[in-house]
Amino acid sequence: MWLTLEAAHAYSERMDAEIGQLEQKLAMLIAHTRAMREANQSLRRDLVAVQEKNRDLATRMHDASARLDELLARIPVE
């Protein structure tokens, strides 16, 4: 089955339009992927910082608890 020149031109225009739409969608997908990757990296950095702070606070709580235990041990029992 052969296309007439007019039908081939219309077919080509539709195909070009679809390819253009796919290119736009792909560009958007790439942009969203990059943005999500950057956000993920930022969240990972934030998580590491929060985990470090949590460890520091846990250590400080442990040290404070130990000092309180020492102070309580020094209080004379009557």
Image: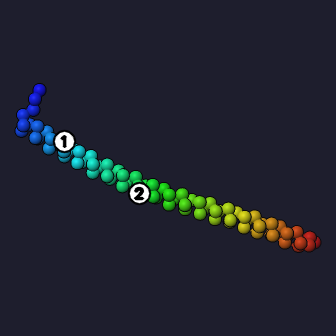
Q: Is residue 26 left or right of residue 12?
A: right
Which one is in front, 7 or 75?
7
Would you place residue 7 above or below residue 53 in this image? Answer: above
Q: On the picture, is 51 further left or further right than 29?
A: right
* Disc 1 target residue: 15
Secondary structure under the numbered disc 1 in the rendered image: helix
Question: In the structure shown, which secondary structural element does the residue marked by tag 2 occupy?
Answer: helix
Q: Quadrant of the N terminus?
A: top left
Q: Residues within 10 Å of mark 1 (few under 14, many from 20)?
A: few
Residue 72, located in which quarter of the rendered image? bottom right
Image quadrant in which the C terminus is located? bottom right
Residue at screen point 80% across, 66% down: 66
Q: Is residue 50 left or right of residue 58?
A: left
**Residue 6: x %, y % from top left:** 6, 38
Q: Nearer the viewer, mark 2 or mark 1?
A: 1
18 lies above or below 46: above
| Callout 2–callout 1 Cβ contact below 8 Å | no
Residue 7 rendering spot, x and y as whole percentages: 8, 37
Residue at image point 45% right, 55% down = 37
Count all numbered tags in the image, as a single digit.
2
Q: Residue at x 21, y 44 (%)?
A: 18
Q: At which x and y percent is residue 15?
A: 19, 41
Amino acid type at mark 1:
Met
Residue that label 2 marks: 35
**Amino acid under disc 2:** Ala
* Residue lying at 57% horizontally and 59% vertically, measured from the top left: 47
Q: CA distance from mark 2 to mark 1?
A: 30 Å
